[in-house]
Image (cartoon, rainbow, N blue to C red):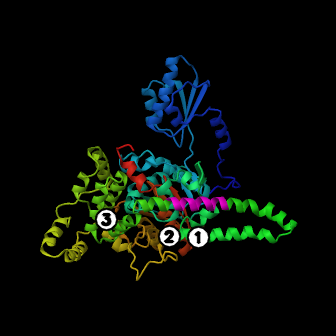
Amino acid sequence: MAFPHRPDAPELPDFSMLKRLARDQLIYLLEQVSARLAPLPHPQLCFLVRPRIKNMRYIASLVNADKVAGRTRKYKVIFSPQKFYACEMVLEEEGIYGDVSCDEWAFSLLPLDVDLLSMELPEFFRDYFLEGDQRWINTVAQALHLLSTLYGPFPNCYGIGRCAKMAYELWRKLEEEEDGETKGRRPEIGHIFLLDRDVDFVTALCSQVVYEGLVDDTFRIKCGSVDFGPEVTSSDKSLKVLLNAEDKVFHEIRNEHFSNVFGFLSQKARNLQAQYDRRRGMDIKQMKNFVSQELKGLKQEHRLLSLHIGACESIMKKKTKQDFQELIKTEHALLEGFSIRESTSYIEEHIDRQVSPIESLRLLCLLSITENGEPKRLQMRIYGPEHLLTFSNLRRAGLLTEQGPGDTLTAVESKVSKLVTDKAAGKITDAFSSLAKRSNFRAISKKLNLIPRVDGEYDLKVPRDMAYVFSGAYVPLSCRIIEQVLERRSWQGLDEVVRLLNCGDFAFTDMTKEDKASSESLRLILVVFLGGCTFSEISALRFLGREKGYRFIFLTTAVTNSARLMEAMSEVKA
């Protein structure tokens, strides 16, 4: 997404300068400073920080420690992506506001890949969707304004969600204030779609099975890179690896279902070996060309191939230990609305075995959203009273609701089971499940055909729709909404879906004349996820792009997954 040859492109920051400053200890990482408030030798300190209250406390501790020790020096705090009044208030409360100078660096977009931009604001989800804090909306609007000044106006704008609408309206105000910047420009991006995370919690709560998603779930991808431990590198050292399109091996497997990855890597290994074997019949001139032109690339590819094979083996070991297949089966049953009693029993057993609080919370939330609430008895069994505040957070965010007296089938099922044999009771349970009170998810799923009906087994090697990212069991709701709106070029015909999503007042369309937009730009779509997006959604939309001839670019407040979602709501520190 960087176009250095363009005259209107912003100058790239001098990262070499930042690295040098960090090496010379003129800029300190707050995590290091907070760990050990040791005396620092330099007469000037500069802090490059996110505008967070805890960071201000750390800086105040350092400055006040200097005062007590009688050290005098200059302090500068640079906030990125913007400065907040609340942070300055904390500095004033701590009595150091007059001792520091404050500035801001509007660095809000970090390109993680050729089609992925992140604002790296993981706190956005909790701040807005739990606390109702709207401070980051201006940052989003500023980022959209920057993109529109670089790539021209967006002819077609769609959005759904309260946060999406607020960000859109603030962005439009910025556009009106600086109307001359984009006036007369030819659009380079034909469509923009803004979507709130709470429109589709289900997708974010599901276990990921595409390779990039599994790597994220297992090893945690941070800022586009991952730390592979000794179990992956086959050495006694860990290795930080950048995961993007530059990695040729990763680029080919990132969007693949995990069941296809080993076969691809095996074939890749054979191909590499065949290229190495070519050396045997070469003369001196050919060998010289091979060494100068190909050998370095082959060695690099071999190293990456070894890493991804190691990552796959590590994932397999961990998932086998966790009984991953049974977990996926339970999730699919919840998504499809069958065998709910068995799924509930699996979750109860998961809680009783004290496997993982985060995993249990995730399954409870998935049960709650798909079945219009979860039995209260499950909450009472989970890991003790220290989780009560976490449950309160989950309810406030809409991730967890309790079933009413008429919602649960357990009581009826237990009465039936006393009258008939166990085998017959199971069949009747399934019948009751199909007659259960329909949650909004069930109705939305039916309206948008989120659960594909397949005769026989779903072919994961040659997928036919976006459901492959969840083994053919479920099409991500967020991606289906985007697909349907793009087909209609509006929300027309989706009124009932919007109502069921409780977004009647927050679905919008803004279309301008497309005279200046080229056919190529109309195939380019910017999707903005507010509150985070998953790698599964990115893979699904990449697939849709290949099928429909679109090219998607993603802008997200942060990349998320089910564990990050639960951790954002948790009040219990790991």
- Three-letter code, disc 3: Thr
Q: Main secondary structure of the magenta part?
A: helix
Residue 184 shows up from this direction? no
Which of the two discs, 3 and 2, labels the residue nearer the N terminus? 2
Distance from label 3 to label 2 (Cα)? 27 Å
Of the 4 image quadrants, the one containing the N terminus is bottom right
Q: Determine whether, in the image, residue 115 is placed left or right of residue 138.
A: right
Q: Determine whether, in the image, residue 244 is placed left or right of residue 346.
A: right
Residue 264, numbered label = 1
Mark in the foreground, 3 or 2: 2
Pointer 3 residue: 370
Question: How many residues crowd around disc 1 within 10 Å: few (fewer than 14), some, or many (20 or more)?
Answer: some
Residue at 69%, 68% in the rendered image:
273
Residue 259, numbered label = 2
Location of residue 429 in the rendering, given as x and y in whole percent from the top left corner: 22, 73
- Three-letter code, disc 2: Ser
Residue 293 sits above or below residue 270 on the image? above
Q: Is residue 181 highlighted in magenta?
A: no
Q: Secondary structure at mark 2?
A: helix
Residue at 60%, 54% in the rendered image:
242
Location of residue 465 in the rendering, given as x and y in whole percent from the top left corner: 47, 75
Q: Secondary structure at mark 3?
A: helix
What segment carries the magenta color? 302-314
Residue at 42%, 70% in the rendered image:
475
Marks counted in the figure total 3
